[in-house]
Image: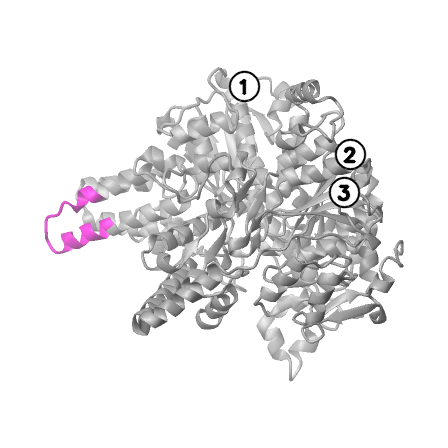
């Protein structure tokens, strides 16, 4: 994402401004140190001009941050004006280091200009693990006031004087004077946790930000040109809440506060204050709001439990750790993990603890906080992964004979979930990316086609749910709102299960949130309440009729509108919290926004009893609680940095002449066919691309790419994906996500730093140099062999097989045009070995059966890694394409396939004889 040199361009290119700020401070420091070096040598230098220019480029952004603040910048201006090169360089170095380390949050001396202030200040540095606990959290609060700019520093000092010794945290005020500046501050400064808006603020920013204005007008549907000044504050609250839902927003006004507090337009405001009220009340409310997010009911209680003297007489010898720390043989186990882990271990649910199966106390409160954080009505903790979360949903909302429209390439837990519940899958195909041995996502047209075909056959009532993976393993993100909107136009009570195992972090990105299940459900709910929703449906009804004709060809190619009076919002989202947040492995959630949840509440409870352990891991539950706390307090900033890390990798690979010769990162133009990108978006690094064009794609395109998921092509360097992954792991200690025939998948997350990027680029350069040197030594013959290997990896790729169909013996209506099947019956038919047979993959007997019959029917799931999706499911007819694909596979890991025995098949003699067994 480009960043221009002017301040306006800098400020409203919003994707990478955290990194841009750090880079500009680094640039300022480098120029200041050069100026100081010249001064030490007694040389006259014009380097002071370079320092002034660098400071001028930095200054506009600094108005949106508390540190270093107006005082230190004013001192810096004075030193530069006095030609004090050494003093200016020392101050710039201090400020730069404080920003880099975050020490300004804990060391009062960092805010002072005196050279000895840092050393004299109390030590408020973060303690090491297991060290002293006592430092207070630091955050920043945004105050948006129409007061003259000259008055703002005095207002900030008045706010600081409200601090009390027993405040749980310290916050610094950030003072701005307009709607646009408040929006920019909330975008740029991830440390802002609360916003106080004074009535009567103006709209325009003090800076030139044309892209921002376009965004607010076009993509936020915002027009403030005709608003009275006193209405601007309420609109700002609404916009900021959409931008960052976690923020606590307060309004100060001299209006009738009672009337405003009851206005639906002010629903984004946590509390309305009469402007002349005691300022201390505002201060206390700011602290209370942030502390509410900081509280972790289960984790806090677990810490209290661990500090109590307890004797345990139950079946958990590891609890309290005495069997470990007194052992002669396993003491290293306790030393490695630390005593707190064992002090907090328990299987008790009394004495202030809680039961995860029937939560009524702190676990229930923790789940409610998580629901608030992700925009759900309910959240349920799961301690054995999203595989279990998915199966719980199937068990709760589907029953034998229900039809589920599902992406064939989804995680295996969905297929097993339908085996358990008896629901029948109707598989829909994703678009293929054969060149890279991957599947993309399922086009909306394909999903609509399946629904309309079922409606035409009079079987739409059997469709219970649509299941899709968002985002996919390789980063394809659905237009979740449009998918649900158009499907509900065909069947208004559909349930949607969105598997967002890899996408939980997206809630904290204002760009990606709208494409999450909960974000889209919220938007649909809001749309339904607007008069324009009924107007849109009436216009459609006049053109297409109130009851859509499934044979009408127009339905597939136009956007369908659901009837607002009939549509139900019934959305389930499963998140692998451990995959994208600071949570222990297997920590997962089911998030629910289902208006008819009460119909399934009892069944959901039974599903929890079936799948959840009666001995859940208290530490995983605690880490789920803590992960929510972190994301509500710093998730926005962390996710923004994760995106910046991914963009930095893309830029470094594409911009290096040698690395880019052998490696490349796939952009949207390679990963998403043009028909699904009406915005024309190509890549985050394409010339002319800025955050506004990316926002346009995210809003309009059928599929977009998750910027944090990076497909690195390695086939052009002569490596298949598995070999390259193993090389990076064994030789360079770099772990990757998944592989394909000619690529590997990298994923940036909130744990990554720019140092990780530097290591990756260094390693890619080293490998590229080795390839280059090896080719020079190998001569013409070696070069041709290398080229042949690249051609094999990049061109000689197997065609990806589509799902064939279920055998008629496992279909309730073999004459139907739709292809759902009774996979459960086929699955259990294979439990008896005498009812199964095996055929070698490479033998002639398999080819003979393919050519002459009887049909080959899979007895189990066969899942090669990569690509990681089932190419065979129980009851499926195995066709020539599937066998051809398996024979071309060069992977070592194929679940469900025993190479020594061959492909497991259901014997023709028993097919269909167990139909109806459930």
Which span of residues is magenta-colored? 31-50
User: Horizontally, is 201 left or right of 515 in the view?
Assistant: left
**Residue at the outermost front position:** 852
Query: In this view of the protein, can residue 389 be seen by the observer?
Result: no
The answer for how far apart the CA atoms under marks 2 and 1 are is 61 Å
| Residue 67 location (% of width, % of height) | 39, 43
**Residue at the outermost left position:** 43
Q: Residues within 10 Å of mark 2 (few under 14, many from 20)?
A: some
Going from the N terminus, do you reach mark 3 or mark 2 first? 2
Whether 432 is drawn above or below 332: the answer is: above
| Residue 854 location (% of width, % of height) | 78, 62
Residue with the mark numbered 1: 254
Residue toward you, 606 or 890:
890
Quadrant (top left/top right/bottom left/bottom right) for the C terminus: bottom right
Q: Indicate how the structure is coloured in the image.
A: one colour
User: Horizontally, is 18 left or right of 705 in the view?
Assistant: left
Query: In this view of the protein, can residue 58 be seen by the observer?
Result: yes
Whether 89 is drawn above or below 270: the answer is: below
Residue with the mark numbered 3: 817
Residue with the mark numbered 2: 456
The answer for how far apart the CA atoms under marks 3 and 2 are is 10 Å
Going from the N terminus, do you reach mark 2 or mark 1 first? 1
Find numbered disc 1 in the image and state the secondary structure of the residue it sits on. loop
Residue toward you, 115 or 848:
848
Magenta stretch: residue 37 in it? yes
Query: At 35% from the left edge and 27% from the top edge, which residue is drawn?
Result: 150
């Amino acid at each position: 994402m480009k960043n221009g040199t002017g301040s306006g361009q800098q400020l409203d290119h919003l994707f990478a401004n955290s990194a841009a700020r750090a880079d500009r401070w680094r640039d300022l420091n480098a120029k200041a140190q050069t100026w100081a070096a010249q001064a030490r040598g007694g040389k006259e230098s014009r380097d002071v001009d370079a320092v002034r220019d660098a400071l001028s480029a930095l200054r506009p952004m600094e108005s949106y941050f508390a540190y270093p603040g107006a005082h230190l910048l004013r001192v810096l201006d004075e030193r530069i004006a006095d030609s004090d090169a050494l003093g200016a360089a020392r101050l710039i170095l201090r400020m730069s280091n404080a920003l880099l380390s975050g020490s300004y949050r804990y060391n009062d001396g960092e805010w002072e200009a005196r050279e000895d202030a840092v050393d004299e200040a109390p030590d408020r540095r973060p303690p090491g693990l297991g060290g002293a606990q006592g430092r207070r959290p630091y955050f920043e609060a945004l105050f948006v006031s129409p007061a003259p700019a000259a008055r703002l520093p005095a207002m900030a000092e008045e706010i600081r004087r409200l601090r009390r010794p027993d405040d749980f945290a310290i916050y610094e005020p950030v003072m701005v004077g307009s709607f646009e500046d408040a929006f920019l501050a909330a975008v740029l400064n991830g440390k802002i946790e609360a916003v106080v808006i004074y009535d009567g603020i103006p709209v325009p920013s003090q800076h030139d930000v044309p892209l921002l204005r376009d965004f607010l007008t076009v993509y936020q549907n915002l027009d403030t040109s005709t608003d009275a000044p006193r209405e601007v504050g309420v609109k700002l609250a609404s916009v900021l809440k959409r931008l960052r839902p976690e923020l606590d927003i307060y309004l100060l006004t001299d209006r009738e506060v009672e009337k405003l507090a009851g206005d639906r337009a002010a629903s984004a405001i946590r509390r309305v204050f009469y402007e002349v009220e005691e300022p201390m009340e505002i201060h206390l409310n700011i602290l209370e709001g942030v502390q509410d997010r900081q509280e972790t009911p289960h984790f806090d209680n677990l810490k209290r439990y661990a500090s109590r003297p307890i004797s345990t007489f139950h079946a958990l010898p590891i609890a309290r750790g005495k069997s470990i720390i007194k052992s002669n043989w396993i003491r290293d186990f306790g030393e490695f993990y630390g005593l707190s882990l064992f002090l907090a271990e328990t299987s008790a649910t009394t004495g202030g603890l809680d039961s995860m199966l029937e939560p009524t106390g702190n676990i229930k409160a923790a789940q409610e906080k998580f629901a608030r954080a992700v925009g759900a009505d309910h959240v349920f903790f799961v301690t054995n992964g999203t595989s279990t979360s998915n199966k719980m949903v199937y068990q709760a909302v589907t029953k034998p004979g229900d039809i589920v429209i599902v992406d064939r390439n989804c995680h295996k837990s969905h297929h097993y979930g339908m085996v358990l519940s008896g629901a029948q899958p109707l598989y829909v195909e994703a678009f293929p990316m054969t060149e890279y041995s991957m599947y993309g996502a399922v086009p909306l047209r394909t999903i609509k086609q399946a629904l309309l075909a079922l409606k035409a056959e009079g079987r739409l009532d059997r469709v219970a749910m649509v299941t899709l993976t968002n985002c996919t393993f390789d980063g394809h993100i659905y237009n979740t709102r449009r998918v649900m909107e158009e499907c509900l136009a065909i069947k208004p009570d559909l349930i949607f299960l969105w598997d967002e195992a890899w996408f939980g972090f997206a809630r904290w990105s204002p760009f990606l949130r709208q494409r999450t299940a909960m974000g889209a459900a919220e938007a649909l709910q809001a749309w339904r309440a607007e008069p324009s929703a009924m107007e849109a449906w009436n216009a459609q009804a006049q053109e297409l009729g109130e009851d859509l004709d499934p044979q009408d060809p127009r339905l597939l190619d136009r956007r369908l509108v659901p009837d607002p009076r009939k549509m139900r919002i019934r959305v389930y989202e499963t998140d692998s919290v451990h995959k994208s947040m600071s949570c222990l492995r297997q920590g997962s959630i089911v998030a629910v926004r289902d208006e008819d949840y009460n119909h399934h509440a009892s069944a959901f409870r039974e599903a929890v009893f079936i799948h959840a352990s009666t001995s859940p891991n208290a530490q995983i539950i605690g880490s789920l609680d803590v992960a929510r706390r972190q994301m509500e307090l710093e998730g926005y900033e962390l996710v923004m940095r994760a995106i910046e890390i991914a963009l930095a990798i893309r830029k470094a690979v594409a911009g290096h002449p040698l690395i880019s010769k052998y490696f490349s990162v796939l952009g949207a133009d390679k990963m998403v066919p043009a028909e699904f990108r009406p915005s024309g978006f190509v890549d985050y690094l394409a010339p002319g691309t800025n955050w506004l064009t990316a926002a346009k794609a995210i809003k309009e395109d059928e599929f977009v790419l998750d910027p944090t998921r990076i497909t690195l092509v390695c086939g052009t360097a002569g490596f298949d994906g598995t070999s390259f992954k193993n090389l990076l792991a064994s030789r360079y200690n770099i772990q990757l996500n998944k592989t394909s025939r000619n690529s590997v998948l990298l994923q940036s997350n909130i744990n990554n730093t720019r140092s990780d990027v530097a290591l990756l680029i260094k390693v890619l350069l080293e490998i590229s140099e080795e390839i280059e040197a090896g080719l020079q030594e190998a001569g013409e013959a070696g070069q041709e062999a290398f080229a042949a290997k690249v051609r094999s990896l990049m061109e000689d790729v197997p065609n990806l097989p589509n799902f064939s169909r279920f055998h008629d013996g496992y279909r309730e209506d073999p004459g139907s045009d739709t292809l759902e099947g009774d996979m459960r019956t086929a699955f259990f038919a294979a439990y008896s070995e005498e009812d199964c047979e095996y055929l070698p993959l490479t033998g002639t007997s398999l080819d003979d059966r393919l050519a002459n019959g009887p049909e080959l029917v899979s007895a189990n799931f066969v899942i090669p890694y990569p690509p990681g999706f089932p190419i065979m499911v129980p009851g499926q007819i195995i066709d020539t394409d599937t066998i051809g694909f398996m024979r071309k596979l060069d992977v070592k890991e194929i679940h469900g396939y025993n190479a020594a025995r061959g492909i497991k098949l259901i014997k023709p003699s028993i097919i269909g004889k167990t139909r109806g067994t459930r």
